[in-house]
Image (cartoon, grey):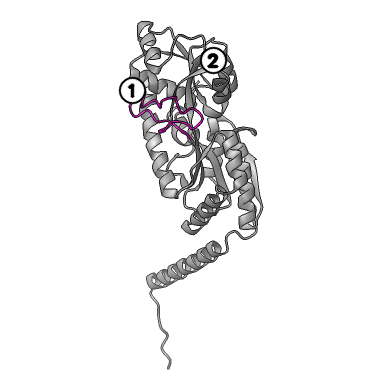
């Protein structure tokens, strides 16, 4: 008589679980090894078309499509200072087919202004690569009496609450720089938010406001033509185009280094081999002559680097602007 072999239920469940895990691991390895499989990759830009993040992102996406031999489409999902597009990517499948081509705002500033968001700006994303940074220039109208940052600070202290600075809107990196100057210098400047950088710059030119931290690409033509006076640059080093203009650090504003970065993120949980491939291909794209020429035109200093470097940059700026926003009691409008 043949005896039947009885398998305990717990052992049976364990065997099924292990088989399932092995199958999942095998499928995951196959999927990563064959990525991309011909599916379209969506590059989400959390801003309207036409800005530097969009324009440069589109060109990089085109290069990425060529190097990966697949289609890459750009999807503009603007609104709520970039957080709508960021939330969409945070909820996407972590398979390498949805990317976020964004800037510092949704990832390091907006989360401190907007209360509870449907994503965690750090935990919900996997850093891929830093695209570049945009330096800014502290500018005043040519008829303003300030020749240096020290002059501006002294005038602000002599007239508390009288001098005003423009920005492209509440919560923008332009406002954050003005708030940082207020806190470091101990001066009560007034913030005047505009609906975009262009009208803010126009009123700085027209001297309806006293000063502005403006993107270098936008301000430089007016500085070189003599319509604006540059007091300092916010980058760590002087700009080649303005070799005689000091950095904020050289103007006695220690640790005042602010650069508006652009970067690529994927949903958290995206397989490491996919992140590594994306990082490698985008770094290669950043060396393409057509991309470097476009970046120069847009005033973007290309960076590249590793996912780890982007992660460290984001965490540092996340903490930095959290402190500035808390101290300034800044609220979203």
Q: Quadrant of residue 311?
A: top left
Residue 164: percent from left, percent from top: 46, 12
Say which of 173 and 299 sits in front.
299
Earlier along the polypeptide chain: callout 2 or callout 1? Answer: 2
Magenta-highlighted residues: 236-260
Image point 57% across, 60% down: which residue? 35
What residue is drawn where x is 41% and y is 46%? Answer: 309
Which secondary structure, mark 2?
Answer: helix
Percent across and percent down for residue 219 are 55, 23
For residue 39, side relative to residue 320 (left or right): right
- Look at the picture and state if 248 lies above or below 147: below
| Label 2 crowd (10 A; few <14 / some 14-19 / many >=20) | many
Residue placed under numbered mark 1 in the picture: 252
Say left or right for 58 vs 120.
Answer: right
The answer to if 74 sits in the magenta stretch is: no
Residue 238, label in figure: none
Q: Is residue 56 left or right of residue 307?
A: right
Residue 60 sits above or below residue 179 on the image: below
Question: Which residue is painted at 38% across and 5% down in the image?
Answer: 159
Position in image of residue 38 (x %, y %) = 65, 59
Where is mark 2, residue-wise? 204
Find out whether residue 243 is within the magenta segment: yes
Q: CA distance from mark 2 to mark 1?
A: 24 Å
Q: Residue drawn at (60%, 44%), measured in percent from left and top?
A: 291
Q: Nearer the viewer, residue 315 or 11?
A: 315
Q: Secondary structure at mark 1?
A: loop
Can you name the residue that lies furthest to the front here? 244
Q: Disc 2, disc 1: CB below 8 Å?
A: no
């Amino acid at each position: 008589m043949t005896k039947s072999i009885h398998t305990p239920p717990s052992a049976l469940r364990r065997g099924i679980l292990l088989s399932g895990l092995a199958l999942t691991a095998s499928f995951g390895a196959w999927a990563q090894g064959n990525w991309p499989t011909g599916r379209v990759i969506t590059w989400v830009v959390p801003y309207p078309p036409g800005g530097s993040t969009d324009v440069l992102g589109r060109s990089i996406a085109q290069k990425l499509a060529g190097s990966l031999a697949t289609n890459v489409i750009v999807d503009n999902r603007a609104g709520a200072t970039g957080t709508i597009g960021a939330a969409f990517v945070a909820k996407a499948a972590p398979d390498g087919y949805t990317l976020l081509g964004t800037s510092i705002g949704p990832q390091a500033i907006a989360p401190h202004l907007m209360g509870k968001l449907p994503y965690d700006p750090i935990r919900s994303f996997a850093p891929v690569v830093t695209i570049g940074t945009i330096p800014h220039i502290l500018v005043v109208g040519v008829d303003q009496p300030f020749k240096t940052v020290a002059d501006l600070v002294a005038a602000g202290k002599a007239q508390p609450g009288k001098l005003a600075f423009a920005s492209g809107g509440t919560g923008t990196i332009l406002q954050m720089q003005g708030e940082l100057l207020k806190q470091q210098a101990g001066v009560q400047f007034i913030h005047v938010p505009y609906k975009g950088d262009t009208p803010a710059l126009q009123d700085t030119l027209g001297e309806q406001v006293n000063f502005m931290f403006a993107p270098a690409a936008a301000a430089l033509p007016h500085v070189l033509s003599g319509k604006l006076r540059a007091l300092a640059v916010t980058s760590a080093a002087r700009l080649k185009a303005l070799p005689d203009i000091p950095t904020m650090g050289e103007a006695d504003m220690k640790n005042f280094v602010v650069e508006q970065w652009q970067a690529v993120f994927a949903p958290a949980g995206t397989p490491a081999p996919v992140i590594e491939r994306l990082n490698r291909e985008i770094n290669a794209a950043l060396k393409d002559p057509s991309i470097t020429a476009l970046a120069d035109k847009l005033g973007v200093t290309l960076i590249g680097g590793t996912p780890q470097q982007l992660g460290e940059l984001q965490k540092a700026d996340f903490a930095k602007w959290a402190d500035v926003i808390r101290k300034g009691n800044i609220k979203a409008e």
